[in-house]
Amino acid sequence: MTKNQRQHRISELLEREVISTAAQIVTRLQSEGIAATQATVTRDLQELGTIKVRDEHGSRRIVIATAAKMSSAPLDHLRRMMGEWVVSVESSDNLVVVRTPPGCAHVVASALDRSALDGVLGSVAGDDTILVIASERRGGSLLAEEFRALAGLVVFSTAPKKGV
């Protein structure tokens, strides 16, 4: 395992678990078959820019200082970003394509990633397009419907009206 891979794994652990010491990280890495000494993990923590804080439950934990917040961004923030910037949402299987004006995709993708929506595995943003991967149990069509609702997009039916 490379240093970057180890540091990425450490950052994932810090996001998902309450960890207060480098020794806990060493133990957790070892349980996953990753060899690392406490000195190595301590250096990794320094390079990652971590700090120790008390979370909302009063527990001491190590967090990455550059993280925007300890908890997820509120859904209302995502609703505002999507309402302002999203122009269309389409889906296929477990993929959702979100379109924005040029240069705006990263703003919506950041809000989406920080919202920690259930069933969203991840997103990739380009200039005006975001690819969102939905979990298999959630599916792209359900997630796309939720995105359209958050963005306030009206879905027009293409089916012909009766009697016309």
Image (tube, helix red, strand yellow):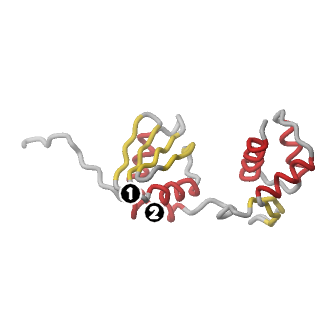
- 38 to the left or right of 80: right
Q: Helix or strand or loop: what does disc 2 sit on?
A: helix
| Residue plotted at (43% across, 59% down) | 104
Give coordinates of residue 10: x percent, y percent: 77, 47
Q: Which residue is mark 2?
A: 81
Q: Amino acid at mark 1?
A: Pro
Q: Position of residue 121 (x, y in %)?
A: 57, 43
Q: Image check: 60 left or right of 117?
A: right
Mark with earlier residue (1, 2): 2
Q: Nearer the viewer, residue 64 or 91?
A: 64
Q: Position of residue 45 (x, y in %)?
A: 82, 55
The image quadrant of residue 141 is top left
Residue 71 falls in image quadrant:
bottom right
Which mark, residue 71?
Answer: none
User: At x 80% / y 66%, what residue is drawn?
Assistant: 53
- Residue at 42% x, 49% y: name it: 129
Q: Which residue is mark 1?
A: 102
Asked whether 117 or 49 is in front, the reply is 49
What x and y, as percent, mark residue 32?
A: 81, 35
* 67 relative to 9, above or below: below
Q: Residue furthest left?
A: 164
Q: Amino acid at mark 2?
A: Met
